[in-house]
Image: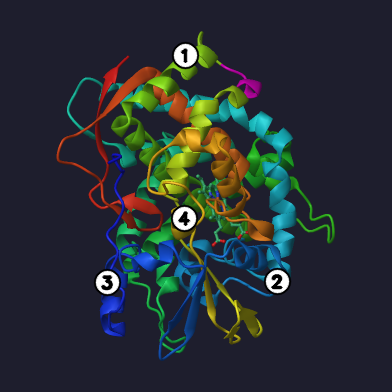
Protein backbone atom coordinates (compact mmCIF):
# COMPACT_ATOMS: atom_id res chain seq x y z
CA UNK A 1 0.00 0.00 0.00
CA UNK A 2 1.39 3.44 -0.86
CA UNK A 3 1.84 5.84 2.05
CA UNK A 4 -0.98 8.33 1.45
CA UNK A 5 -0.86 11.86 2.86
CA UNK A 6 -3.79 12.94 5.09
CA UNK A 7 -7.25 13.34 3.58
CA UNK A 8 -10.36 14.30 5.56
CA UNK A 9 -12.87 11.51 6.17
CA UNK A 10 -16.05 11.83 4.07
CA UNK A 11 -19.53 11.79 5.57
CA UNK A 12 -22.03 8.96 4.89
CA UNK A 13 -23.92 9.37 1.63
CA UNK A 14 -27.32 10.08 3.16
CA UNK A 15 -27.74 12.46 6.09
CA UNK A 16 -30.57 14.77 7.12
CA UNK A 17 -30.39 18.43 6.11
CA UNK A 18 -29.99 19.38 9.76
CA UNK A 19 -27.04 17.00 10.22
CA UNK A 20 -25.52 18.36 6.99
CA UNK A 21 -25.71 21.94 8.35
CA UNK A 22 -24.03 20.83 11.54
CA UNK A 23 -21.25 18.97 9.74
CA UNK A 24 -20.86 21.87 7.36
CA UNK A 25 -20.37 24.39 10.12
CA UNK A 26 -17.64 22.21 11.57
CA UNK A 27 -15.75 21.66 8.36
CA UNK A 28 -16.94 21.81 4.76
CA UNK A 29 -14.47 19.19 3.52
CA UNK A 30 -15.52 16.36 5.80
CA UNK A 31 -19.18 17.41 5.40
CA UNK A 32 -19.14 16.10 1.81
CA UNK A 33 -19.89 12.52 0.69
CA UNK A 34 -17.11 10.51 -0.99
CA UNK A 35 -19.08 10.20 -4.24
CA UNK A 36 -18.06 13.76 -5.11
CA UNK A 37 -14.58 12.42 -5.94
CA UNK A 38 -16.19 10.36 -8.71
CA UNK A 39 -19.30 12.25 -9.88
CA UNK A 40 -19.37 14.64 -12.85
CA UNK A 41 -22.06 16.70 -11.19
CA UNK A 42 -24.02 16.64 -7.95
CA UNK A 43 -27.29 18.38 -7.19
CA UNK A 44 -28.16 19.43 -3.65
CA UNK A 45 -31.77 20.32 -3.09
CA UNK A 46 -32.67 22.19 0.04
CA UNK A 47 -36.03 23.69 0.93
CA UNK A 48 -34.51 27.11 0.21
CA UNK A 49 -32.59 26.71 -3.00
CA UNK A 50 -30.62 24.39 -5.23
CA UNK A 51 -26.93 23.97 -5.46
CA UNK A 52 -24.92 22.22 -8.19
CA UNK A 53 -21.37 21.05 -7.79
CA UNK A 54 -19.72 20.76 -11.20
CA UNK A 55 -16.76 18.45 -11.78
CA UNK A 56 -17.35 17.83 -15.49
CA UNK A 57 -14.52 19.77 -17.24
CA UNK A 58 -16.95 21.03 -19.89
CA UNK A 59 -19.25 22.47 -17.24
CA UNK A 60 -16.33 23.98 -15.37
CA UNK A 61 -15.25 25.67 -18.61
CA UNK A 62 -18.76 26.91 -19.25
CA UNK A 63 -19.03 28.49 -15.81
CA UNK A 64 -15.54 29.98 -15.66
CA UNK A 65 -14.74 30.72 -19.27
CA UNK A 66 -18.15 31.76 -20.57
CA UNK A 67 -19.43 35.26 -19.93
CA UNK A 68 -18.65 36.33 -16.34
CA UNK A 69 -22.02 38.08 -16.31
CA UNK A 70 -23.83 34.72 -16.68
CA UNK A 71 -22.25 33.30 -13.51
CA UNK A 72 -21.48 36.23 -11.21
CA UNK A 73 -20.15 35.88 -7.68
CA UNK A 74 -23.04 35.38 -5.34
CA UNK A 75 -24.18 38.13 -2.99
CA UNK A 76 -23.46 35.84 -0.07
CA UNK A 77 -19.73 35.99 -0.81
CA UNK A 78 -19.99 39.74 -0.82
CA UNK A 79 -21.91 39.91 2.44
CA UNK A 80 -19.41 37.71 4.26
CA UNK A 81 -16.40 39.72 3.22
CA UNK A 82 -17.77 43.25 3.01
CA UNK A 83 -16.53 44.61 6.37
CA UNK A 84 -12.92 43.93 5.42
CA UNK A 85 -12.95 44.17 1.65
CA UNK A 86 -15.44 46.92 0.81
CA UNK A 87 -15.72 47.00 -2.97
CA UNK A 88 -12.64 45.01 -3.77
CA UNK A 89 -12.18 43.20 -7.07
CA UNK A 90 -12.72 39.85 -5.34
CA UNK A 91 -16.37 40.55 -4.64
CA UNK A 92 -17.54 43.03 -7.25
CA UNK A 93 -19.36 42.05 -10.45
CA UNK A 94 -20.30 43.65 -13.78
CA UNK A 95 -18.77 46.91 -14.99
CA UNK A 96 -17.14 47.81 -11.66
CA UNK A 97 -15.26 44.50 -11.59
CA UNK A 98 -14.21 44.79 -15.26
CA UNK A 99 -12.81 48.28 -14.70
CA UNK A 100 -10.94 47.17 -11.58
CA UNK A 101 -9.32 44.24 -13.42
CA UNK A 102 -8.23 46.54 -16.27
CA UNK A 103 -6.33 48.65 -13.75
CA UNK A 104 -4.91 45.80 -11.65
CA UNK A 105 -3.89 43.22 -14.25
CA UNK A 106 -0.97 45.12 -15.82
CA UNK A 107 0.82 45.20 -12.45
CA UNK A 108 1.01 41.39 -12.41
CA UNK A 109 2.15 40.84 -16.00
CA UNK A 110 5.35 38.88 -16.70
CA UNK A 111 7.66 41.84 -17.28
CA UNK A 112 6.47 43.50 -14.12
CA UNK A 113 7.16 40.37 -12.10
CA UNK A 114 10.80 40.63 -13.10
CA UNK A 115 10.89 43.98 -11.25
CA UNK A 116 9.07 42.45 -8.27
CA UNK A 117 11.47 39.54 -7.99
CA UNK A 118 14.22 41.15 -5.85
CA UNK A 119 11.66 41.95 -3.13
CA UNK A 120 10.47 38.32 -3.15
CA UNK A 121 14.04 37.15 -2.91
CA UNK A 122 14.66 39.39 0.11
CA UNK A 123 11.53 38.03 1.79
CA UNK A 124 12.77 34.47 1.18
CA UNK A 125 16.16 35.25 2.71
CA UNK A 126 14.42 36.87 5.70
CA UNK A 127 12.27 33.72 6.13
CA UNK A 128 15.42 31.56 6.27
CA UNK A 129 16.89 33.89 8.92
CA UNK A 130 13.67 33.84 10.94
CA UNK A 131 13.49 30.03 10.88
CA UNK A 132 17.13 29.65 11.76
CA UNK A 133 16.21 30.41 15.39
CA UNK A 134 14.20 27.19 15.45
CA UNK A 135 16.80 24.97 13.82
CA UNK A 136 18.03 22.03 15.89
CA UNK A 137 15.34 22.79 18.52
CA UNK A 138 11.95 21.18 19.23
CA UNK A 139 8.93 21.10 16.91
CA UNK A 140 7.81 24.33 15.17
CA UNK A 141 4.29 25.16 14.00
CA UNK A 142 5.08 25.81 10.37
CA UNK A 143 1.82 27.45 9.18
CA UNK A 144 2.51 30.44 11.43
CA UNK A 145 5.96 30.72 9.87
CA UNK A 146 4.74 30.51 6.28
CA UNK A 147 2.03 33.09 7.07
CA UNK A 148 4.71 35.43 8.31
CA UNK A 149 6.83 34.84 5.20
CA UNK A 150 3.93 35.28 2.78
CA UNK A 151 2.76 38.48 4.50
CA UNK A 152 6.32 39.76 4.24
CA UNK A 153 6.31 39.06 0.48
CA UNK A 154 3.11 41.07 0.06
CA UNK A 155 4.34 44.13 1.96
CA UNK A 156 7.75 44.11 0.31
CA UNK A 157 6.36 43.76 -3.21
CA UNK A 158 3.40 46.10 -2.78
CA UNK A 159 4.79 48.86 -0.57
CA UNK A 160 8.55 48.20 -0.43
CA UNK A 161 8.39 47.65 3.35
CA UNK A 162 9.21 44.49 5.33
CA UNK A 163 6.79 42.88 7.77
CA UNK A 164 8.86 44.39 10.61
CA UNK A 165 7.60 47.84 9.54
CA UNK A 166 5.29 49.16 12.25
CA UNK A 167 2.16 49.44 10.07
CA UNK A 168 2.78 46.19 8.15
CA UNK A 169 3.25 44.31 11.43
CA UNK A 170 0.07 45.85 12.85
CA UNK A 171 -1.96 44.76 9.77
CA UNK A 172 -0.59 41.25 10.12
CA UNK A 173 -1.38 40.91 13.82
CA UNK A 174 -4.82 42.55 13.58
CA UNK A 175 -5.62 40.23 10.70
CA UNK A 176 -5.00 37.26 13.00
CA UNK A 177 -7.52 38.66 15.48
CA UNK A 178 -9.94 39.22 12.61
CA UNK A 179 -9.70 35.58 11.60
CA UNK A 180 -10.32 34.44 15.13
CA UNK A 181 -13.40 36.66 15.22
CA UNK A 182 -14.68 35.28 11.92
CA UNK A 183 -12.80 32.12 11.08
CA UNK A 184 -14.75 30.79 8.11
CA UNK A 185 -15.63 34.11 6.65
CA UNK A 186 -15.93 33.32 2.96
CA UNK A 187 -17.07 29.76 3.38
CA UNK A 188 -20.24 31.00 5.04
CA UNK A 189 -21.16 31.85 1.48
CA UNK A 190 -21.49 28.16 0.73
CA UNK A 191 -23.96 27.53 3.51
CA UNK A 192 -27.33 26.96 1.94
CA UNK A 193 -29.27 29.48 4.00
CA UNK A 194 -32.15 31.44 2.53
CA UNK A 195 -31.25 34.86 1.20
CA UNK A 196 -33.71 36.69 3.47
CA UNK A 197 -31.98 35.42 6.59
CA UNK A 198 -29.85 38.30 7.91
CA UNK A 199 -26.09 37.74 8.27
CA UNK A 200 -24.51 39.19 11.36
CA UNK A 201 -20.95 40.26 11.76
CA UNK A 202 -19.75 40.24 15.34
CA UNK A 203 -18.60 43.50 16.88
CA UNK A 204 -15.08 42.14 16.97
CA UNK A 205 -15.22 41.36 13.22
CA UNK A 206 -16.33 44.90 12.44
CA UNK A 207 -13.78 46.43 14.79
CA UNK A 208 -10.80 44.46 13.48
CA UNK A 209 -11.87 45.03 9.86
CA UNK A 210 -12.02 48.77 10.58
CA UNK A 211 -8.60 48.76 12.20
CA UNK A 212 -7.02 46.86 9.30
CA UNK A 213 -8.58 49.24 6.79
CA UNK A 214 -7.40 52.24 8.82
CA UNK A 215 -3.82 50.94 8.77
CA UNK A 216 -3.93 50.22 5.04
CA UNK A 217 -5.36 53.67 4.44
CA UNK A 218 -2.33 55.16 6.18
CA UNK A 219 0.00 53.34 3.75
CA UNK A 220 -2.12 54.25 0.74
CA UNK A 221 -2.45 57.92 1.63
CA UNK A 222 1.31 58.18 2.21
CA UNK A 223 1.94 56.56 -1.13
CA UNK A 224 -0.48 58.93 -2.88
CA UNK A 225 1.53 61.84 -1.43
CA UNK A 226 4.83 60.30 -2.58
CA UNK A 227 3.47 59.77 -6.08
CA UNK A 228 2.44 63.45 -6.22
CA UNK A 229 5.87 64.50 -4.94
CA UNK A 230 7.62 62.25 -7.47
CA UNK A 231 9.40 60.28 -4.71
CA UNK A 232 7.41 57.02 -4.80
CA UNK A 233 9.32 53.73 -5.06
CA UNK A 234 8.67 51.70 -8.20
CA UNK A 235 6.65 48.86 -6.66
CA UNK A 236 3.25 47.24 -7.18
CA UNK A 237 1.32 49.88 -5.22
CA UNK A 238 2.79 52.72 -7.30
CA UNK A 239 2.14 50.80 -10.48
CA UNK A 240 -1.51 50.16 -9.61
CA UNK A 241 -2.14 53.67 -8.31
CA UNK A 242 -0.72 55.30 -11.41
CA UNK A 243 -2.39 53.01 -13.96
CA UNK A 244 -5.39 54.57 -15.66
CA UNK A 245 -8.21 52.43 -17.00
CA UNK A 246 -7.55 52.36 -20.77
CA UNK A 247 -11.30 52.71 -21.47
CA UNK A 248 -12.40 55.42 -19.07
CA UNK A 249 -9.12 57.04 -18.00
CA UNK A 250 -10.10 56.50 -14.32
CA UNK A 251 -7.51 55.79 -11.63
CA UNK A 252 -8.29 54.34 -8.18
CA UNK A 253 -9.03 56.89 -5.50
CA UNK A 254 -7.68 56.22 -1.99
CA UNK A 255 -10.75 54.33 -0.78
CA UNK A 256 -10.91 52.02 -3.78
CA UNK A 257 -7.19 51.38 -3.45
CA UNK A 258 -7.68 50.45 0.21
CA UNK A 259 -10.27 47.87 -0.93
CA UNK A 260 -7.77 46.39 -3.38
CA UNK A 261 -4.84 46.34 -0.95
CA UNK A 262 -7.07 44.57 1.56
CA UNK A 263 -7.75 41.79 -0.94
CA UNK A 264 -4.13 41.57 -2.08
CA UNK A 265 -3.16 41.08 1.52
CA UNK A 266 -5.93 38.59 2.25
CA UNK A 267 -5.89 36.60 -1.02
CA UNK A 268 -2.17 36.93 -1.51
CA UNK A 269 -0.84 35.84 1.85
CA UNK A 270 -3.33 33.30 3.22
CA UNK A 271 -3.23 31.21 0.06
CA UNK A 272 0.53 31.20 -0.45
CA UNK A 273 1.04 30.49 3.25
CA UNK A 274 -1.26 27.48 3.08
CA UNK A 275 0.41 26.09 -0.06
CA UNK A 276 3.90 26.56 1.37
CA UNK A 277 3.02 24.96 4.71
CA UNK A 278 1.58 21.84 3.01
CA UNK A 279 4.51 21.67 0.62
CA UNK A 280 6.94 21.70 3.57
CA UNK A 281 4.89 19.04 5.34
CA UNK A 282 4.98 16.84 2.23
CA UNK A 283 8.74 17.35 1.99
CA UNK A 284 9.10 16.16 5.57
CA UNK A 285 6.85 13.19 4.92
CA UNK A 286 8.53 12.16 1.65
CA UNK A 287 12.26 12.71 2.33
CA UNK A 288 13.35 11.31 -1.04
CA UNK A 289 11.57 14.26 -2.71
CA UNK A 290 12.99 16.65 -0.17
CA UNK A 291 16.52 15.53 -1.04
CA UNK A 292 15.85 15.96 -4.78
CA UNK A 293 14.56 19.44 -4.12
CA UNK A 294 17.52 20.34 -1.89
CA UNK A 295 19.97 19.14 -4.53
CA UNK A 296 18.28 21.20 -7.24
CA UNK A 297 18.22 24.26 -4.96
CA UNK A 298 21.96 23.94 -4.33
CA UNK A 299 22.69 23.54 -8.04
CA UNK A 300 20.59 26.49 -9.14
CA UNK A 301 21.14 28.85 -6.21
CA UNK A 302 24.73 28.37 -5.08
CA UNK A 303 26.65 30.49 -4.71
CA UNK A 304 24.38 33.17 -3.28
CA UNK A 305 21.78 35.10 -5.16
CA UNK A 306 19.91 33.93 -8.25
CA UNK A 307 18.31 35.99 -10.96
CA UNK A 308 14.74 36.05 -12.16
CA UNK A 309 15.67 33.96 -15.20
CA UNK A 310 16.96 31.16 -12.93
CA UNK A 311 13.53 30.59 -11.36
CA UNK A 312 12.53 28.55 -14.40
CA UNK A 313 15.33 26.12 -13.47
CA UNK A 314 13.61 25.23 -10.19
CA UNK A 315 11.72 22.42 -11.91
CA UNK A 316 11.48 19.94 -9.04
CA UNK A 317 10.40 22.74 -6.75
CA UNK A 318 7.68 23.84 -9.16
CA UNK A 319 6.32 20.30 -9.50
CA UNK A 320 6.39 19.81 -5.72
CA UNK A 321 4.56 23.11 -5.18
CA UNK A 322 1.99 22.19 -7.84
CA UNK A 323 1.45 18.75 -6.35
CA UNK A 324 1.05 20.27 -2.88
CA UNK A 325 -1.67 22.56 -4.27
CA UNK A 326 -3.31 19.63 -6.08
CA UNK A 327 -3.64 17.65 -2.85
CA UNK A 328 -4.34 20.66 -0.60
CA UNK A 329 -5.85 23.27 -2.85
CA UNK A 330 -5.52 26.51 -0.83
CA UNK A 331 -8.94 27.67 -2.08
CA UNK A 332 -11.03 24.51 -1.76
CA UNK A 333 -14.29 25.69 -3.31
CA UNK A 334 -15.68 28.64 -5.26
CA UNK A 335 -19.27 29.76 -5.53
CA UNK A 336 -21.13 31.40 -8.37
CA UNK A 337 -24.78 32.07 -9.07
CA UNK A 338 -26.74 31.24 -12.24
CA UNK A 339 -27.93 34.64 -13.52
CA UNK A 340 -30.40 32.95 -15.89
CA UNK A 341 -31.89 29.45 -16.25
CA UNK A 342 -29.35 26.89 -17.51
CA UNK A 343 -29.28 23.26 -18.54
CA UNK A 344 -26.42 21.18 -17.10
CA UNK A 345 -25.99 17.53 -18.11
CA UNK A 346 -29.66 17.12 -19.04
CA UNK A 347 -30.87 18.83 -15.89
CA UNK A 348 -32.69 22.12 -15.57
CA UNK A 349 -30.80 24.58 -13.40
CA UNK A 350 -33.14 27.34 -12.24
CA UNK A 351 -32.09 30.98 -12.21
CA UNK A 352 -30.51 31.91 -8.87
CA UNK A 353 -29.12 28.41 -8.25
CA UNK A 354 -25.81 28.20 -6.51
CA UNK A 355 -23.01 26.79 -8.67
CA UNK A 356 -20.12 25.30 -6.74
CA UNK A 357 -16.76 24.62 -8.33
CA UNK A 358 -14.56 22.52 -6.14
CA UNK A 359 -10.83 22.47 -6.83
CA UNK A 360 -10.65 20.20 -3.77
CA UNK A 361 -12.70 17.44 -5.45
CA UNK A 362 -11.48 18.06 -9.00
CA UNK A 363 -7.86 17.72 -7.89
CA UNK A 364 -8.57 14.29 -6.38
CA UNK A 365 -11.15 13.17 -8.93
CA UNK A 366 -10.72 9.47 -9.62
CA UNK A 367 -11.81 9.71 -13.26
CA UNK A 368 -9.26 12.42 -14.01
CA UNK A 369 -6.15 11.46 -12.04
CA UNK A 370 -4.29 8.18 -11.74
CA UNK A 371 -3.61 7.42 -8.05
CA UNK A 372 -5.45 10.62 -7.09
CA UNK A 373 -4.61 10.55 -3.37
CA UNK A 374 -0.90 9.77 -3.79
CA UNK A 375 1.80 12.40 -3.51
CA UNK A 376 3.81 12.21 -6.74
CA UNK A 377 5.26 15.45 -8.15
CA UNK A 378 6.63 13.35 -11.03
CA UNK A 379 3.07 12.90 -12.32
CA UNK A 380 3.18 16.25 -14.11
CA UNK A 381 5.75 14.81 -16.51
CA UNK A 382 3.33 12.01 -17.51
CA UNK A 383 0.47 12.15 -20.05
CA UNK A 384 -2.13 11.71 -17.31
CA UNK A 385 -0.57 14.49 -15.25
CA UNK A 386 -0.44 16.86 -18.20
CA UNK A 387 -4.06 16.15 -19.06
CA UNK A 388 -4.99 16.64 -15.41
CA UNK A 389 -3.29 20.03 -15.44
CA UNK A 390 -5.34 21.06 -18.47
CA UNK A 391 -8.70 19.70 -17.38
CA UNK A 392 -8.86 19.18 -13.64
CA UNK A 393 -6.43 21.57 -11.99
CA UNK A 394 -7.82 24.85 -10.73
CA UNK A 395 -5.84 26.14 -7.75
CA UNK A 396 -6.04 29.65 -9.23
CA UNK A 397 -9.47 29.25 -10.85
CA UNK A 398 -9.56 30.00 -14.62
CA UNK A 399 -11.18 32.26 -17.21
CA UNK A 400 -11.81 35.95 -16.75
CA UNK A 401 -11.88 35.80 -12.95
CA UNK A 402 -8.67 33.80 -12.76
CA UNK A 403 -6.42 34.81 -9.86
CA UNK A 404 -4.43 37.85 -11.04
CA UNK A 405 -1.65 36.77 -8.66
CA UNK A 406 -1.18 33.28 -10.17
CA UNK A 407 2.11 33.98 -11.98
CA UNK A 408 3.33 35.89 -8.92
CA UNK A 409 2.47 32.95 -6.66
CA UNK A 410 4.12 30.43 -8.98
CA UNK A 411 7.38 32.35 -8.62
CA UNK A 412 7.05 33.09 -4.91
CA UNK A 413 6.09 29.52 -3.87
CA UNK A 414 8.88 27.50 -5.53
CA UNK A 415 11.44 30.22 -4.73
CA UNK A 416 10.74 30.27 -0.98
CA UNK A 417 10.36 26.50 -0.85
CA UNK A 418 13.77 26.05 -2.46
CA UNK A 419 15.42 28.62 -0.21
CA UNK A 420 14.03 26.92 2.91
CA UNK A 421 14.85 23.37 1.86
CA UNK A 422 18.34 24.45 0.80
CA UNK A 423 18.91 25.76 4.33
CA UNK A 424 17.10 23.16 6.49
CA UNK A 425 16.09 19.52 6.59
CA UNK A 426 12.41 19.23 7.63
CA UNK A 427 11.10 16.23 9.53
CA UNK A 428 7.64 15.18 10.67
CA UNK A 429 6.83 14.97 14.39
CA UNK A 430 5.53 11.57 15.54
CA UNK A 431 1.88 11.68 16.60
CA UNK A 432 1.25 15.01 14.85
CA UNK A 433 -0.32 14.03 11.53
CA UNK A 434 -2.12 17.20 10.33
CA UNK A 435 -5.85 17.01 9.63
CA UNK A 436 -6.85 19.20 6.66
CA UNK A 437 -9.75 21.55 7.32
CA UNK A 438 -11.24 24.36 5.28
CA UNK A 439 -10.81 27.68 7.08
CA UNK A 440 -10.35 30.74 4.93
CA UNK A 441 -7.96 28.45 3.06
CA UNK A 442 -7.16 24.78 3.61
CA UNK A 443 -5.28 24.61 6.91
CA UNK A 444 -4.46 21.86 9.39
CA UNK A 445 -6.84 21.46 12.33
CA UNK A 446 -4.11 21.81 14.98
CA UNK A 447 -1.41 23.30 12.81
CA UNK A 448 1.47 21.60 11.03
CA UNK A 449 4.32 20.67 13.33
CA UNK A 450 7.78 19.95 11.95
CA UNK A 451 11.32 19.86 13.26
CA UNK A 452 14.15 21.39 11.29
CA UNK A 453 17.88 20.94 11.29
CA UNK A 454 20.48 23.07 9.50
CA UNK A 455 21.95 21.46 6.40
C1 LIG B 1 -0.83 30.12 -3.93
C2 LIG B 1 -1.32 31.33 -4.00
C3 LIG B 1 -2.69 31.70 -4.50
C4 LIG B 1 -3.79 30.90 -4.75
C5 LIG B 1 -3.91 29.40 -4.60
C6 LIG B 1 -4.85 31.79 -5.21
C7 LIG B 1 -6.12 31.34 -5.59
C8 LIG B 1 -7.12 32.16 -6.05
C9 LIG B 1 -8.41 31.70 -6.51
C10 LIG B 1 -8.87 30.24 -6.57
C11 LIG B 1 -9.13 32.79 -6.88
C12 LIG B 1 -10.57 32.79 -7.42
C13 LIG B 1 -11.55 32.82 -6.29
C14 LIG B 1 -12.99 32.84 -6.76
O1 LIG B 1 -13.25 33.02 -7.93
O2 LIG B 1 -13.87 32.68 -5.90
C15 LIG B 1 -8.31 33.94 -6.64
C16 LIG B 1 -8.69 35.25 -6.87
C17 LIG B 1 -7.93 36.33 -6.58
N1 LIG B 1 -6.61 36.33 -6.15
FE1 LIG B 1 -5.46 34.70 -5.81
N2 LIG B 1 -4.40 33.07 -5.20
C18 LIG B 1 -3.08 33.07 -4.80
C19 LIG B 1 -2.25 34.16 -4.67
C20 LIG B 1 -2.63 35.47 -4.92
C21 LIG B 1 -1.76 36.61 -4.85
C22 LIG B 1 -0.26 36.54 -4.52
C23 LIG B 1 -2.53 37.71 -5.10
C24 LIG B 1 -2.15 39.18 -5.15
C25 LIG B 1 -1.08 39.71 -4.68
C26 LIG B 1 -3.88 37.25 -5.36
C27 LIG B 1 -4.95 38.06 -5.63
C28 LIG B 1 -6.21 37.62 -6.00
C29 LIG B 1 -7.30 38.53 -6.36
C30 LIG B 1 -7.26 40.05 -6.35
C31 LIG B 1 -8.39 37.70 -6.72
C32 LIG B 1 -9.78 38.17 -7.19
C33 LIG B 1 -9.86 38.16 -8.70
C34 LIG B 1 -11.24 38.43 -9.29
O3 LIG B 1 -12.24 38.05 -8.68
O4 LIG B 1 -11.30 38.99 -10.38
N3 LIG B 1 -3.90 35.89 -5.24
N4 LIG B 1 -7.07 33.54 -6.16
Does label 2 or label 4 sit earlier along the sequence?
2
Q: Position of residue 198 (x, y in %)?
A: 41, 84
Image coords of residue 214 (percent x, y): 48, 56
Label 1 sits on residue: 298
Q: Badge 1, how many Cα within 10 Å: few under 14, some, many 20+?
A: some
Label whose residue precedes the other's in the sequence (1 or 3): 3
| First reached walking from the N terminus: tag 3 or tag 2 | 3
> Which residue is labeled 3 in the image?
12
Query: Could you tell me which secondary element the residue under label 1 belongs to?
Result: helix
How far apart are the alpha carbons under marks 1 and 3? Answer: 47 Å
Residue 278 against residue 303 in the figure, above or below: below
* Residue at mark 2 to residue at mark 4: CA–CA distance: 23 Å
Q: Is mark 4 within 8 Å of ligand 1?
A: yes
Q: Which residues are magenta?
A: 306-310
The quadrant of the rendering that contains the N terminus is top left
Mark 2 packing: few (<14 Cα in 10 Å), some, or many (20+)? Answer: few
* Circle number at residue 331: 4
Nearer the observer: mark 3 or 2; the answer is: 3
The answer to the question of whether label 1 and label 2 lie on touching residues, with beta carbons closer than 8 A, is no
Q: Tell me if residue 194 can be seen.
A: yes
Specify the quadrant that holds the C terminus: top left
Counting from the top left corner in percent of width and height, residue 375 is at: 39, 40
* Nearer the observer, 70 or 3: 3
Q: Is residue 250 left or right of residue 404?
A: right
Residue under the point 65% across and 63% down:
61
Which residue is disc 2 drawn over? 94
Question: In the figure, is residue 126 to the left or right of 106?
Answer: left
Amino acid sequence: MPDLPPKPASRPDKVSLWKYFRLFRKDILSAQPSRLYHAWMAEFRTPFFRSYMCNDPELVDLVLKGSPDDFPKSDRVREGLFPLLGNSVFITNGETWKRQRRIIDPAFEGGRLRDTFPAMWDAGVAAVERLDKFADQGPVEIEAQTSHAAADVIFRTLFSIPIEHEVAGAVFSTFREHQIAQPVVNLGALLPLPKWMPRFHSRKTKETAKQIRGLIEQLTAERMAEIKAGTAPDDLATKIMTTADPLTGDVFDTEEMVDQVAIFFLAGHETSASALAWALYLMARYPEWQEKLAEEAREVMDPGKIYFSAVSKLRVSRDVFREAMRLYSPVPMMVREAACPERFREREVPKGSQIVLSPWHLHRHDRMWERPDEFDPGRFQTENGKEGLRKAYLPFSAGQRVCPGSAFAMIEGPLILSLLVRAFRFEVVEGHEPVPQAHLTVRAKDGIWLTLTRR
